[in-house]
Image (spheres, grey):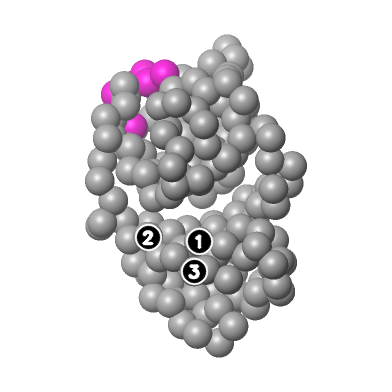
Amino acid sequence: MNIQLFSKKNTKPSIWSGGLTYEYMIDPKTANYADGDFSFRISSATIEEVPSEFTKFKGYHRYLVMLDNDLDVEVNKEKKVHEKYEIMEFNSDDEVTSFTKGTDFNWMVSEKVSDHKLEIANGNQNCNTEVVIVFSLDATVITIDEKPYHLEPHDALVIENQEKENVRLHFSNECLLGVLDF
């Protein structure tokens, strides 16, 4: 089992048409976001231009969570409002326009990946998937099999668990919890 902590303060921004994007992790590590050859990508972005067209990627499922306010969007010409921390799911090839400024969490998963889910978790969790992703919403202590990890707001922790061992997690505060099996 491999556990990696990705600090928000150590991520480098890249420019997208509506603001900045901060990549925490891309899998495999040799993948290139622009080439669209990844199985999944974890990032956070700022939405600074209104309206903003979200970047389209054919062949990806996308989870997006606003971290600082509600999200007013149009998905394929249908207006929707998502509350802060509400999980929005869509096909990355959809036409998505944001009418809200703010900061989001973004998890893109290839449609070739069979099993994935994102939820808000708190307290105790047991996971036995190949990849476990934790994204802190506030300062949080995450205990993994009795070892504590201290996360600042918007840090990410990724557990690569190829053997699919049962991993016991405890969250001191609410976090985003993503699980994935290839």
Mark 1, residue position: 158
Between 51 and 70, the one lying in front of the other is 51
Residue that appears at 45% across and 26% down: 35
Residue at the spot 59% in from the left edge and 15% down from the top edge? 76
Q: Which residue is mark 2?
A: 6
| Mark 2 crowd level (few <14, some 14–19, many ≥20, 10 Å Cα) | some
Of the two numbered discs 1 and 2 on the same chain, state the one appearing first in sequence: 2
* Residue at the top extreme, as displayed: 77
Distance from Cα at disc 1 to Cα at disc 3 = 6 Å
Residue type, mark 3 in image: Ile
- Residue 88 at least partly seen: no
The region drawn magenta spans 47-53
Amino acid found under the numbered disc labelled 2:
Phe
> Residue 168 colored magenta?
no
Residue type at tag 1: Val
Side of 75 where 164 appears, left or right? right
Residue 162 lies, with reference to residue 97, above or below; the image says below
Q: Secondary structure at mark 2?
A: strand
Badge 3 element: strand
**Relative vertical location of residue 175 with respect to residue 181 in this rendering, above or below:** below
Residue, disc 3: 3
Q: Identify the secondary structure beneath mark 1.
A: strand
Q: Residue at x 44, y 65 (%)?
A: 4
What whole-number distance in Å separates the C-alpha atoms at marks 3 and 2?
10 Å
Asked whether, in this view, residue 37 is left or right of residue 11, the answer is right
N-terminal of the pair, mark 1 or mark 3, is: 3
Looking at the image, which residue is at 54% across and 16% down? Answer: 95
What is the crowding at mark 3: few (fewer than 14 residues within 10 Å), some, or many (at least 20)?
few
Q: Quadrant for the N terminus, please.
A: bottom right
Marks 1 and 2, how far apart at CA: 8 Å
